Image (cartoon, rainbow, N blue to C red):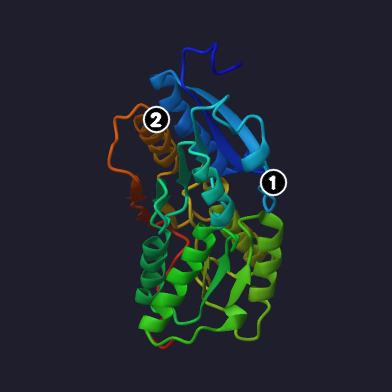
């Protein structure tokens, strides 16, 4: 048996399959952080790729049981708390990343809602009233919370929540491109767009360029991630820096402390702060507008 012959703890890191998974900034940064801690703590880290909507393998995979692993880190759970609870019932130590759960389950997440509140307040402060958003994957808590933060600020400032200004991009290039096309061909097009990831924000800038809409003079754009890919943008992108590597690192460290009995007061719940990085893709609106 793998576990019996190993002198190290063995953790499984569960990530879900999606378009561009191995080019995903989130996935690569999370694995980088987890690997850093695993190496330092002499933990063997197994990457287990699961399907997005079908999670039976969480329960029946030979890899994800106590004969083979000492603990499981979930890269995300796609809102599937029901199956997650069944994993917890099997008494396998586990920790969930990218979700802050009400249930008594170990978790570590980014403060997505407050990060978005800061972004949209910044755009309102620049004089924008026609603010659109391209959402992430709304089966993820990150996607839901970023949309919620957007709506909260508009409500606070008595700005209408316009259904035409909310488009889904799923954190992916192709749907984000289509979403940007839709937004930028509206009769009353937005003067600012918050995209819930940098990859999607770059698609907005590309579509704006195709349509001869100047960024930031005619359109302000904000992303989310502070992905190195933004260095290739024609306009330096205002974005949210989120500590994904740190989240991966802390996930492994905390699970290790749970498995080895160093943490007694369970569950572990950690919410990590973000930072708004202001660059040149946003500009104040004239006072009349």
- Residue 277 position (above or below residue 41): below
Q: Identify which residue, 16 or 125, lies in the foreground.
A: 16
| Secondary element at tag 1 | loop
| Secondary element at tag 2 | helix
Q: Identify which residue, 12 or 17, lies in the foreground.
A: 12
Could you tell whether 234 is left or right of 265 in the image? right
- The circle drawn on residue 7 is none
> Residue 112: x, y in percent?
42, 59
- The circle drawn on residue 51 is 1
Q: Residue at x 60, y 61 (%)?
A: 139
> Residue 53: x, y in percent?
68, 54
| Location of mark 2 (residue) | 259
Is residue 34 visible to us here? yes
Q: Are marks 2 and 1 in contact (CB under 8 Å)?
A: no
Please tell me how crowded label 1 is: few (under 14), some (14-19), or many (20+) other residues with Cα within 10 Å. few
- Residue 120 position (above or below residue 108): below
């Amino acid at each position: 048996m793998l576990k019996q012959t190993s002198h190290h703890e063995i953790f499984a890191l569960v990530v879900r399959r999606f378009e561009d998974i191995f080019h995903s900034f989130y996935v690569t940064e999370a694995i980088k952080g987890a690997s850093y801690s695993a190496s330092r703590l002499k933990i063997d880290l197994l990457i287990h790729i699961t399907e997005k909507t079908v999670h039976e393998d969480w329960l029946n995979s030979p890899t994800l049981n106590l004969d083979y692993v000492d603990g499981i880190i979930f890269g995300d759970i796609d809102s599937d708390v029901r199956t997650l609870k069944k994993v917890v019932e099997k008494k396998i130590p586990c920790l969930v990343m990218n979700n802050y759960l009400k249930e008594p389950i170990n978790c570590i997440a980014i403060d997505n809602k407050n990060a978005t509140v800061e972004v949209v307040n910044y755009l309102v402060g620049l004089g924008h009233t026609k603010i659109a958003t391209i959402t992430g994957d709304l089966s993820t808590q990150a996607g839901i919370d970023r949309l919620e933060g957007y709506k909260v600020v508009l409500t606070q400032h008595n700005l209408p929540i316009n259904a035409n200004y909310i488009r889904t991009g799923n954190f992916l290039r192709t749907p984000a491109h289509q979403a940007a096309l839709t937004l930028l061909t509206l009769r009353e097009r937005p003067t600012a767009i918050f995209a819930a990831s940098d990859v999607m924000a770059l698609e907005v800038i590309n579509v704006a360029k195709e349509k001869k809409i100047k960024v930031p003079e005619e359109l302000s754009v904000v992303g989310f991630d502070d992905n190195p890919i933004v260095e290739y943008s024609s306009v330096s992108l205002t974005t949210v820096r989120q500590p994904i590597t740190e989240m991966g690192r802390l996930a492994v460290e905390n699970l290790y402390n749970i498995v080895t009995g160093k943490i007694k007061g369970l569950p572990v719940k950690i919410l990590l702060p973000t930072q708004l990085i202001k660059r040149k893709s946003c500009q104040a609106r004239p006072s009349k507008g």
